[in-house]
Amino acid sequence: MPLPLYTVDAFTCRAFGGNPAAVCVLDHARDAAWMQSVAAEMNLSETAFLLRDGLEWQLRWFTPKVEVKLCGHATLASAHILWETAALPREQALIFNTLSGKLTCTSRGDWIEMDFPSEPPVEIGDPGDLLAALNVNGIVVGRKRNRMDFLVEVENEQAVRALKPDFLLMKTLPVRGVIVTARSDDARYDFVSRFFAPAAGIDEDPVTGSAHCCLAPYWAAKIGKSEMVGYQASGRGGIVRVALRGDRVMLGGQAVTMMRGELAK
């Protein structure tokens, strides 16, 4: 039977903004090779696969190249679709079972709040080819990493926006991706960022929820705020609200359905 398939722009309130994700609602368990083939066919930064598991949902995320352990925007897109299609009442929280444990999503009016693990970065020694891969011009304020990514703070927002990385060199780094960040020049936001993950098949991700699991504790420690707003300064751009709660980060975003269809095979 055909499977419902959607595309959703996540971390935005407007069409053609934020980060597009595909969401496929399964009728039974499928193997990883099949899901990887569908993700490659969709050719978006992430494709989410949902399977009902009693009152909860199994959730897996695939880039066109690999399965990933944590993805914010495709989780946001999944929650948006399940509520929009009335798979369960909007007042009922969604619980997803994932490779990063249980993740909970709650509807907050026009926003969706996701309960994700905090992924604080730690100091690193020699970063190898990290700075060469970024082609950083200007002052590098700090270099850290967590279990998934490198994080580099640069001197200002302009330096973030001006980056033109060497993606071939970046692909050799021993991490999923690289987060680059700075304080925001816009009073509406506390910090800006960009995220690069060529090793996962994504040169630049438009808006990355999981990167904000690192950005939230990093900026909370620097500026003394537990609730902040981040802007990911990609070509599409997107807004992520963050709130640090102990070892968890609440990620807030909006989403817009762009396509409804069926997967025939």
Image (cartoon, rainbow, N blue to C red):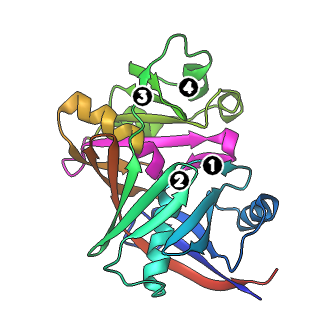
Closer-to-camera residue (96/150): 96
Numbered disc in front, either 2 or 4: 2
Measure the alpha-carbon separation of dots 2 and 3: 17 Å
The answer to whether residue 138 shows anywhere in this view is: no
- Give the label on residue 231, or none: none
Quickly name the residue at label 1.
Answer: 68
The answer to whether residue 213 shows anywhere in this view is: yes
Amino acid type of disc 3?
Pro
- Which quadrant does the C terminus fall into? bottom right
Residue 186 among magenta residues = yes
Quickly name the residue at label 2.
Answer: 71
Which residue extends farthest front? 54
Of the two numbered discs 4 and 1 on the same chain, state the one appearing first in sequence. Answer: 1
Closer-to-camera residue (4/117): 117
Measure the alpha-carbon separation of dots 4 and 3: 22 Å
**Which span of residues is magenta-colored?**
185-212
Numbered disc in front, either 4 or 3: 3
Quickly name the residue at label 4.
Answer: 135
Quarter residue 80 falls in: bottom left
Of the two numbered discs 2 and 3 on the same chain, state the one appearing first in sequence. Answer: 2
